[in-house]
Amino acid sequence: MSGFFEIKKSVQKVKTCSDCRLLENCNSPRMKPYGSFKKGIMTIGEAPGYFEDSVGKPWQGITGNLLNRTFEKFGINLFEDCINLNAVSCRPIDSNGRNKTPNKQQIDICRRFVMKAVENYKPKMIFLFGGIAVESLFGLRWKKELGTITKWRGFVIPDQELKAWICPLFHPSYIERSDSGVEETVWKNDLKNALNYLDKEVPVVKEPVIHFTDDLSFFNNIKNGITAFDLETTGLKPHAIGHRIICCAVAVSADECYVFRIPQSRKERQPFIDYLENDNIKKIAHNIRFELEWCKVKLGVDVKGWEQDTMVMAHILDNRTGITSLAFQTYVNFGVIDYKDETQPYLEADKKNANSINRIMEFMEVPGGSAKLLGRCADDAIFEYRLYEKQKIDLLPF
């Protein structure tokens, strides 16, 4: 069994309100979630401002009024239908007593309150308004660089851990300050699109059948059709001495995959080579250039029968920067977050030298490392196949 999308729970070094001390200078310390929650919606904002701190409730004043009015247009009452809270529970202020953006320590300290609220209320949908809210909910769960709210806004994510639709949007204060009106149109469209999912169940990601094998005769049963394949290698580029392809996974459907270590002799590899050279067997990869180059240099094979590059298609569907990696696409489309977490550090090499060798062989010597690496490879191939199928649906409007 691959340990399909195993997720390691992160442990946060505990800091308390005494380390933050925001509560010493606000009227409503540790502001509690507020709202009747009739429709199972949770909103998470940034932090209390002057008006919120004065009355002890989220979303007051100009910004809250804008959000409330906008929700009303889509049949949602902010305080009757939602439970509302902030990433930081106390009002942050500068030396002049003005609102201040919360810092990382403040977000980290308050995160336990946010996660506890999610656990207690079990919302069907969570709106993350602004980058601070994204940092609060994802900060310990997403190990790569988060980026800005511009990267995340608009996605409706079927989070498998939280069993909720996660919907990052611009913060309404940003919309209120905007001059062009374009941002407000985008914001309202994102909000409207997200609410279309409110009455839909979060789909449960099905665990695939993974065959760990040393017998490549399974290729004899793949005569045609569509497959997705993924390689795990000792680096990004294959040209330096010592580089190797360690293993390969071939998904024959969205729910079944074979994964194997690359045999040392060409005779043993021949079924794999025949598969790669067979133009009738269509192939999917996430960044075709990577698999193409490694197969050509290390196996002497020019791969034929390419069907789709899911990375390129992700860019065609949405050309924002920073969103085309398989890990990101897997999370925003299927809700599986950081399934690569444990293996990733060993696969990273010198960023200044594309031909440098990573630590993959070291990981293979870790107890259970070989099985985990093969499991990750299989997960990649399965998600490539599922992403291919999802992208075909997403392309229908075009």
Image: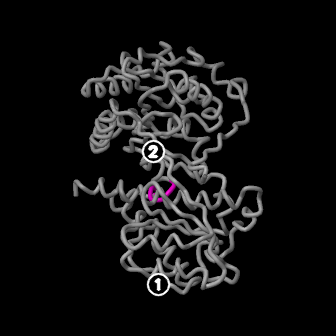
Q: Are the residues at dot 2 and dot 1 in contact (C-beta closer than 8 Å)? A: no
- Per the image, is 325 magenta? yes
Kind of element beneath mark 1: loop
> Within 10 Å of the Cα at label 1, are there few (<14), some (14-19), or many (20+) other Cα atoms?
some
User: Where in the figure is residue 343, as x and y percent of width and height?
Assistant: 65, 57
Q: Is residue 93 visible?
A: no
Q: Using residue 180 as the reference point, say whether residue 239 is left or right of it.
A: right
Horizontally, residue 286 falls left or right of residue 105, namely: left
The x and y percentages for residue 281 are 39, 74
Label 2 amino acid?
Answer: Ile
Which comes before the other along the chain, label 2 or label 1? 2
The amino acid on which the numbered mark 1 sits, given as a three-letter code, is Asp
What residue span does the magenta drawing correspond to? 322-327
Vertical order, 252 against 89 (above or below): below
Q: Residue at x 44, y 31 (%)?
A: 126
Q: Residues within 10 Å of mark 2 (few under 14, many from 20)?
A: many
Q: Is residue 33 above or below residue 343?
A: above
Q: CA distance from mark 2 to mark 1?
A: 41 Å
SS at mark 2 in the image: helix
Left or right: where 254 falls relative to 10: left
Q: How many marks?
A: 2
Q: Is residue 15 left or right of residue 28?
A: right
Q: Quadrant of residue 202?
A: top left
Residue at the spot of label 2 = 149
Disc number placed over residue 302 in the picture, else none = 1
Query: Residue 81 placed where, x, y %?
Result: 36, 19
Task: Choose top left, top right, bottom left or bottom right for residue 116.
Answer: top right
